Amino acid sequence: MAEVLEREADVVIVGSGGAGMYAALVAARAGADVLLLDRSLIGRGGATVMAQMTVAAAIGHAELDDWRDHYADTLAAGRGLNNEPLARLLCADAPERILEMAEWNVGWASEGNAITQAMAPGHSARRCVYVDYLDTGPAVSRTLRAQLSRTEGVTRLADLVAREVVVADGRAVGIHGHHLSSGREVAITADAVVLATGGLTRLYARNSASANMGGDGFALALRAGAELVDMEFVQFFPIGHLAPRMIGMDPIMWDPFRYKLGGRLLNAEGEEFTERYGVTEDGSYKITRDLATYAIYKEVEAGRGSPHGGAWLSFEHISESDLRAAFGPVIDRLAANGIDLTKTRIEVSPIAHYHMGGMVVDEAMRSRVPGLLAAGELVGGAGGANRLSGNAISEALVFGARAGQTAAAMSTARNSAAVRAAAEAAIGGAGDLGDYNPAARILELQGLLNRDVGPFRDADALARALARIEAMTAEAAALGPPIAQGAFDAAFLDRLDLANMLLTAEAITRAALARDESRGAHQREDYPEMDDAWGENQYSSLSEGRLALERRPVVREDAA
Amino acid sequence: MSGAVARLRVKRGTPENDQGHQTFEVPFEEGQSLLDGLRRIRAEQDPSLAIRFACINANACKECIVKLDGKTVYACTTRLIAGEMTVDPLPNKPLIRDLVTDIAPRGDRIQDQA
């Protein structure tokens, strides 16, 4: 029996996307000894590195702007459900983070000394910064990795999956993890645990997710005793790439194209159909995400969809030279995929992209479990019922910095015996799965959520999904706890992921079933209107192993 | 072309237990990547096949690097073909299992740290 690997630090951070890396930098610079874990490679596996889009911050380089206007836009997009102090924090701190990244040479597109800022749907000013060409996320990741490598006090641990937050005497005291490349259980004792594991869009068959976005942080948080909020609000990105098949290109790439070049969203009859849903675009990019998702679904439903069941996106009216000026080498990568935008339209459709819901935290990123913090997309509430475009990376950086600051100041409460005991309990035993294929079950779950818990839901579909999720959960539990058989046991990893995906999927489905109205990213076919009585948030928690839901008023700003 | 298959000869095993190449057949679909084929094998035939990837299709994570017919490629940006493809782990990195090697940079591995 391989013994448990033990590590200890002031702060342990799970996930090395933008939020986790920023938290690590800030905590270490405040004097903390930090362990930064990732189930993949450090700074490679999260959503940040895949972000090709823009980052919203009221720095006022393109035109007069104020973070209060950004805040007002964020609340308007959120349809009355935003946690106001968190949304305010996001908008107020974003400029500082963006300018700090500029000092660290991230390479924001700029002219002279002015950083270029694009207009984006839902924003009242040109506010969104980016790195050419389609390089925003990779540049942010690269920059943070470079800062980490020159910061004392951060130890990076790749290939390390967090299995549980260890809680002793009501306090988070560390992480029980699994080191994939050696197959060993790991006990990490710390004073503060920061979950920065990102979103959950891998739960959907059509997504812009990486393999790491199965919602593990949501499940870990629930099991540790923390609360989740707004789980019914999954944002669908309306114009994910659908056809023709491309390789080596992220499906969200058309958003930056629309920012710069407009483009025309067309139905099967060649009409710009957004007018029918109240938004006249006329070749510019104006429609917000929830409305565009709705419009495309309705067109498909009415038999006016593109051949693969989406909409056409056309840049045919834009000249080759304008395309090249805007996207240079990307045009060659498209050509390698057989796509010439001056001659061919592409097909797009909504794909799961971001989760508005997440862990309930205060402005210092503290959950109700002492010692347990969150950062980045895993934080719930800032976006309300619909996140404003450009706010995800801002949120990662701002909330990451806050979490790092709070974690570094946490008082000591080491309990390495409890963490070791949790890790030791996972050693030994057979892992025989018989005919059970957890990779196939993951595919099934993704198909189920896409069909029954997508942007348009009704009571029958949600109830059917819930019943199947419960059956799959029981089936997985009957196999006993997952036990790794050596290094990189892929089926074992699938079982860990599936267990987390099932619990997270159940939380989404139950919240979606309870909210019998339509608002933002949550659209009920059987309750198509917004209901003022539902101007409240739903909180999910685990109570004696069962998910419980509770309605509470929105957290408003103190009238200061 | 219906009925066409991709035959993937995939290296299996660990440093202690070399199992040679195992051949899998998956239906060939125009436009798919080598990674699509490998993931399909896991979901439909053998979930124990160990492969490493994160971003799936974005060419962002750089984790799915393998040898294909002797050449170093990313599985996500290589097209599947309706023929035979031989896939091996990187020869210059420590083998972990099947196609997975230890590609984490020095300093990011738990075994490098006391």
Image (tube, coloured by chain):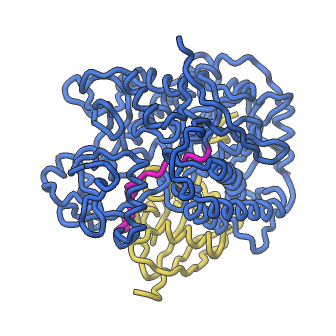
Chain colours: A blue, B yellow
In x, y percent, where is residue A114?
A: 23, 24
Residue A181 seen in the current view:
no
- Left or right, A292 with reference to A539: left
The residue that appears at 66% across and 25% down in the rendered structure is A366
- Above or below residue A528? Residue A472 is below
Residue A525 seen in the current view:
yes
The residue that appears at 63% across and 30% down in the rendered structure is A553
The residue stretch that appears in magenta:
A231-247
Q: Is residue A525 magenta?
A: no
View extreme (bottom): residue: B3
Give the image quarter of residue A259.
Answer: top left
The residue that appears at 44% across and 60% down in the rendered structure is B74
In x, y percent, where is residue A250?
A: 40, 54
The residue that appears at 30% across and 48% down in the rendered structure is A279
- Above or below residue A471? Residue A156 is above
Q: Nearer the viewer, residue A83 or A107?
A: A83
